[in-house]
Image (cartoon, rainbow, N blue to C red):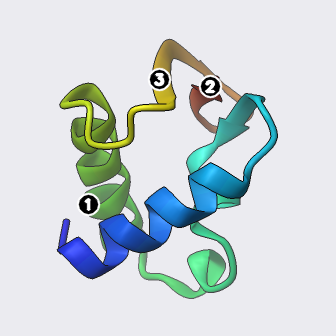
Amino acid sequence: MDEALLNRLHDRAAALSPGEFHFPELYGEGWDRLWIGDKVRIGREFLNAVRAGRLPDVKDTGRKAGGGRIYRKR
């Protein structure tokens, strides 16, 4: 994941209220226009960034529902 996108996601995560969310909610506008392969790649890169602690207030719940992985913001 390039630093510009990671920084954008970090800023958007900081603005989220605490609770659970799906990645497309954080990604925002433009998600639905992405090619499926890009969605998979970006989603995997986000998961790896979360697991590596690059977004400290976001945790992977380890669950999936509603078509995607669920994350939690503290």
Q: How many residues crowd mark 1 within 10 Å: few (<14), some (14–19), many (20+)?
A: few
Q: Which residue lies under the disc numbered 3?
A: 59
Quadrant assignment, res 67: top right
Q: How far apart are labels 3 and 1 at the CA level?
A: 19 Å
| x 52%, y 14%: residue | 61
- Asked if 29 appears above or below 48 in the picture, the reply is below
**Mark 1 vs 2, N-terminal side:** 1
Residue 3 in the image: state x and y as whole percent.
Answer: 21, 73
Q: How many residues crowd mark 2 within 10 Å: few (<14), some (14–19), many (20+)?
A: some
Q: Which residue lies under the disc numbered 2?
A: 72
Amino acid beneath label 2: Arg
**Mark 3 vs 1, N-terminal side:** 1
- Asked if 3 appears above or below 47 in the picture, the reply is below
Is residue 50 toward the left or the right of residue 68 in the image?
Answer: left
Amino acid beneath label 3: Lys
Q: How far apart are labels 1 and 2 at the CA level?
A: 20 Å
Q: Which residue lies under the disc numbered 1?
A: 41
| x 64%, y 77%: residue | 32
